[in-house]
């Protein structure tokens, strides 16, 4: 049986402390739910924090790296997929995930959200940026949900997964 893959996307070196705390908790909660965590795989920002959280809960982590340099992978990534595709790897992140959680916001994260919406994927925004929330909800209100904290994001994932199996 195929495992459920939850993508956590967010800023690398521009992640805030709140983004990092939320990402760590998301990773932990994803692992506790028995899902696989997928990130951009690098050893910085939301990618690294989410992977560390999942590993703390004995979860399985997958990282889709933008370069061919495996040394940029988070030490908490179990399966590093080397792409050498740069930002084009964002489409792989999105298409390989059953649900996407955007933790924080940056240009790369915004591109992943847009790609997810184009692919009719469900997206959960975990940030307090009302401009980005309004913008993405205006593009696809039925695909975008707002979470106030990591626990509510996981509740939304559970709901989306249940709705998809009907």
Image (spheres, helix red, strand yellow):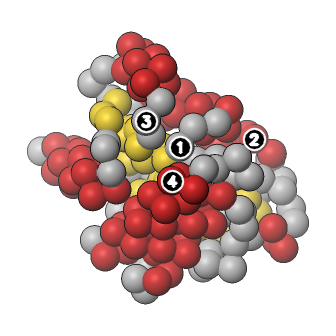
Find the distance from the CA under tag 1 to the CA under tag 3.
8 Å
Mark nearer the N terminus (4 vs 2): 4
Residue 90 seen in this snapshot: yes
Q: Residues within 10 Å of mark 3 (few under 14, many from 20)?
A: some
- Residue located 41% across and 43% down the image: 126
The residue tagged 4 is: 18
Mark nearer the N terminus (4 vs 1): 4
Residue 105 versus residue 80: which sits nearer the camera?
A: 105
Find the distance from the CA under tag 4 to the CA under tag 2.
24 Å
Residue 122's quadrant in the figure? top left
The residue tagged 3 is: 128
Task: Judge depth for marks 2 and 3 and give the one in front.
Answer: 3
* Rendered image: mark on residue 87: 2
Residue most extreme to the right: 69
Find the distance from the CA under tag 4 to the CA under tag 1.
8 Å
Q: Please indicate whether residue 61 sits to the left or right of residue 145 in the image.
A: right
112 vs 138: above or below: below
Mark nearer the N terminus (2 vs 3): 2
Q: In the rendering, at what x and y percent does residue 142 appear?
A: 27, 24
The residue tagged 1 is: 104
Assign a secondary structure to mark 3: loop
Mark nearer the N terminus (2 vs 1): 2
- Residue located 39% across and 13% down the image: 138
34 vs 160: above or below: below
Assign a secondary structure to mark 2: helix
Find the distance from the CA under tag 2 to the CA under tag 1.
18 Å
């Amino acid at each position: 049986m195929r495992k459920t893959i939850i993508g956590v996307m967010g800023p690398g070196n521009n992640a805030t402390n709140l983004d990092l705390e939320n990402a760590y908790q998301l990773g932990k909660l994803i692992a506790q739910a028995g899902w696989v965590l997928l990130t951009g795989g690098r050893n910085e920002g939301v990618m690294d924090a989410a992977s560390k959280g999942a590993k703390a809960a004995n979860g399985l982590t997958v990282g889709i790296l933008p370069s061919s340099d495996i040394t940029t992978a988070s030490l908490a990534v179990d399966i590093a997929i080397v792409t050498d595709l740069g930002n084009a790897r964002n489409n792989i992140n999105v298409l390989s995930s059953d649900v996407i959680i955007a933790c924080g916001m940056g240009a790369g994260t915004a591109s992943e959200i847009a790609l997810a919406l184009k692919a009719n994927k469900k997206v959960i925004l975990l940030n307090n940026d009302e401009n980005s929330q309004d913008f993405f909800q205006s593009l696809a209100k039925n695909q975008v949900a707002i979470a106030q904290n990591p626990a509510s994001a996981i509740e939304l994932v559970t709901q989306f997964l249940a709705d998809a199996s009907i």
